[in-house]
């Protein structure tokens, strides 16, 4: 681990071979994390177990708040916080790195299974912003939980092992696609057209839906679940392929779900190394960012406040004024990805202000779209301090705006933290092909984001 600090540079230059090795060693276990954490629940489980293995104690087992103490808070299996208690009184604020562990995907509908033309299919409702055509004609794995009426939870993962079957959504052959090809891309494939192929063998020809009946039997035999149990389930179709090194120089990583598990992973690795910080350090891993941070596992809820109140309660400071002070005096990095300039699509990027692969972690002053709508615009005073920190700690970084002004934009969790008065700026890696089933990042950037988060939590 000592070797990691050899990579000390605050500008983008050619990497030396020994520096490349540091980066390679750091990112190798990241591939494993991506393969093991393809859903929010799986990512949280990985983070939770890693934290427990590194001495983080569940908050339920903590009696009081002591400097240096390491605490983990997990809610509903889908959101998690890791805390390293600082020497300063907690009401002076917390340094928070917040990422999200949900990614765009295809969720099964609550009554998904049907039969048509002698085939069994599963209906889906996509989650987050996808380009629908990207989800056709690729192998899909099914991940998630089914909760039975008696409360029993059945975990399902099919399609990850080489011997597993996969699901897929068929694409229309070009021979019959003349009309489709003339349509607008957004209209060529309908949401109701995203039905995954699940079976083709009729169990009993006298049945009304013999192919579907066979799938129902398989569900019963292999998982002990009834068809109606699917109404209380959380089943997600995700790309069945594994994370891979990309490029003949192996400089990049291609995988599903790097928005925003790359930030989750880098911040996890960072907080594992934070020791005796002055200010309390916290990594937040949130759900539901891709659909607006809504719901009781998203950051547009009272979850940050509730976590802070629980911590302050342990410190014996659960009065309203101290709680508000703690939140208002906190500082945050909204650890989320930005769009990397893509030479295949030069028209949508403003090259002076956009971010590039391999040029370091990206500081994004504002997000939002078309006139900064829905953006949290970071205060320059805060940005100045972050710049100085990164320079001192030899973190290579770049600025990044998400595309041209009138072209688009995006949201992050920054606005929900700014709500409390805390200083916050977006800080994460640049991604190419964001929201596609195979997103690309640069290994050097992943490493630099980890250095940035560690510096922020340890020294800010
Ligand atoms: Mn994101
Ligand atoms: Mn996203």
Image: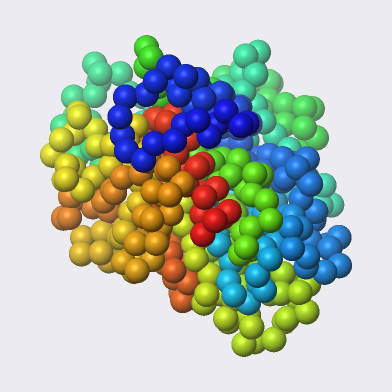
- Residue 312 is left or right of residue 238, and the answer is right
Counting from the top left corner in percent of width and height, residue 49 is at: 74, 41
- Residue 287 is left or right of residue 9, and the answer is right
Counting from the top left corner in percent of width and height, residue 229 is at: 72, 45
Front-most of 135 and 355?
355
The image quadrant where one finds the N terminus is top right
Identity of the residue drawn at 50% across and 66% down: 331
Identity of the residue drawn at 24% across and 16% down: 175
- Examine the rendered structure and indicate whether residue 256 appears above or below residue 420: above
Tell me which corner region of the image, top left, top right, bottom left or bottom right, holds residue 291: bottom left
Q: Residue furthest left?
A: 347
Counting from the top left corner in percent of width and height, residue 128 is at: 43, 48
- Examine the rendered structure and indicate whether residue 335 appears above or below residue 124: below
Identity of the residue drawn at 78% across and 40% down: 53
- Residue 365 is left or right of residue 68, and the answer is left
Front-most of 203 and 269?
269
Identity of the residue drawn at 13% across and 39% down: 347
Counting from the top left corner in percent of width and height, residue 22 is at: 51, 25
């Amino acid at each position: 681990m000592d070797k990691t600090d050899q990579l000390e540079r605050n500008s983008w230059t050619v990497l030396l071979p020994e520096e490349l090795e540091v980066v390679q060693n750091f990112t190798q276990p990241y591939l494993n994390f991506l393969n093991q954490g393809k859903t929010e629940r799986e990512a949280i489980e990985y983070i939770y177990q890693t934290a427990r293995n590194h001495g983080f104690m569940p908050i339920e087992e903590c009696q009081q708040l002591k400097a240096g103490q390491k605490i983990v808070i997990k809610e509903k299996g889908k959101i998690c916080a890791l805390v390293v208690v600082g020497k300063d009184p907690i009401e002076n604020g917390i340094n928070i790195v917040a990422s999200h562990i949900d990614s765009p995907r295809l969720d099964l509908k609550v009554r998904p299974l049907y039969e048509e033309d002698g085939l069994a299919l599963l209906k889906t409702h996509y989650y987050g912003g996808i380009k629908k055509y990207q989800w056709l004609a690729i192998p899909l794995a099914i991940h998630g939980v089914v909760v039975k009426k008696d409360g029993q939870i059945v975990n399902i993962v099919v399609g990850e092992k080489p011997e597993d079957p996969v699901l897929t959504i068929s694409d229309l052959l070009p021979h019959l696609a003349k009309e489709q090809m003339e349509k607008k891309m957004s209209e060529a494939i309908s949401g109701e057209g995203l039905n995954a192929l699940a079976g083709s063998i009729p169990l009993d020809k006298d049945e009304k839906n013999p192919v579907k009946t066979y799938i129902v039997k398989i569900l019963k035999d292999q998982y002990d679940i009834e068809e109606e149990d699917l109404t209380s389930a959380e089943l997600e179709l995700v790309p069945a392929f594994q994370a891979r090194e990309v490029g003949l120089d192996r400089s990049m990583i291609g995988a599903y779900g790097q928005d925003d598990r790359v930030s989750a992973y880098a911040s996890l690795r960072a907080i594992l190394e934070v020791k005796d910080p002055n200010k309390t350090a916290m990594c937040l891993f949130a759900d539901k960012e891709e659909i607006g941070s809504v719901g009781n596992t998203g950051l547009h809820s009272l979850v940050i406040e509730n976590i802070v109140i629980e911590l302050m309660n342990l410190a014996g400071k659960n009065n309203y004024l101290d709680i508000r002070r703690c939140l208002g005096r906190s500082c945050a990095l909204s650890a989320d990805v930005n769009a990397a300039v893509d030479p295949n699509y030069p028209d949508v990027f403003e090259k002076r202000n956009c971010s590039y692969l391999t040029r370091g972690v990206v500081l994004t002053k504002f997000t939002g779209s078309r006139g900064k709508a829905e953006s949290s615009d970071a205060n320059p005073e805060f940005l100045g301090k972050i710049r100085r920190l990164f320079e001192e700690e030899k973190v290579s970084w770049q600025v990044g705006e998400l595309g041209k002004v009138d072209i688009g934009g995006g949201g992050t969790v920054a606005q929900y933290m700014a709500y409390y008065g805390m200083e916050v700026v977006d800080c994460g890696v640049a991604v190419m092909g964001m929201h596609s089933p195979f997103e690309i990042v640069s290994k050097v950037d992943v490493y630099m984001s980890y250095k940035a988060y560690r510096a922020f939590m340890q020294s800010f």
